[in-house]
Amino acid sequence: IARAGRLADGFLASGTNPEAVETLYQMAVDAWDAAGKPGKPRLAAVCSYALGPNAAGVVGDYIRDYYSFLGPVAEQMAQNAVSSTEAVTGMIHDLEGIGMDELVFLPTAAEMGQLDRLADIIG
């Protein structure tokens, strides 16, 4: 994160825990300030999701596999995965509340309908 403060235009956090993302954002802002850069860094996040039938299972399996190197933390991340309309809108709201500038939704189900379902929710 210190390197991002010195060299980058912003910081991209991954995860669905707004409290953890907020901590990372603050570290990025502190690194930015320590580097003497004007203004503030662009704060972005990436959120893995699945919507539709068996969405929780699909996104959970993806997260468990992708983050398996984290051990038990991967299971915790899978339990908090975004897999419903309420979770999508809640994630947007929560991350906007901590200063997020941009949110990238990463579909974890291999079907084009995921993008349509997400578009139906966020417009």
Image (spheres, rainbow, N blue to C red):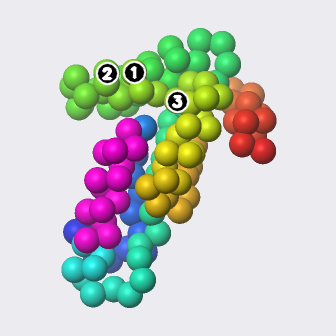
Locate residue 4: give its quadrant.
bottom left
- Residues at discs 1 and 2 in contact (Cβ within 8 Å): yes
Q: Which mark is residue 54?
A: none
Dominant SS of magenta comes to: helix
Give the x, y percent position of residue 55. Answer: 58, 18
Q: Label 3: how many residues lie within 10 Å, few (<14), some (14-19) or many (20+)? A: many
Label 3: element kind: loop
Give the x, y percent position of residue 39. Answer: 42, 83
Q: Nearer the viewer, mark 1 or mark 2?
A: 1
Q: Label 1: how many residues lie within 10 Å, few (<14), some (14-19) or many (20+)? A: some
Q: Which mark is residue 82?
A: 3
Task: Tell which circle, 2 or 3, labels the residue nearer the N-terminal end.
Answer: 2
Magenta stretch, residue numbers = 17-30
Residue positioned 23% across, 31% down in the render: 70
Quadrant in the picture for the N terminus: bottom left
- Which residue was labeled with disc 1? 79
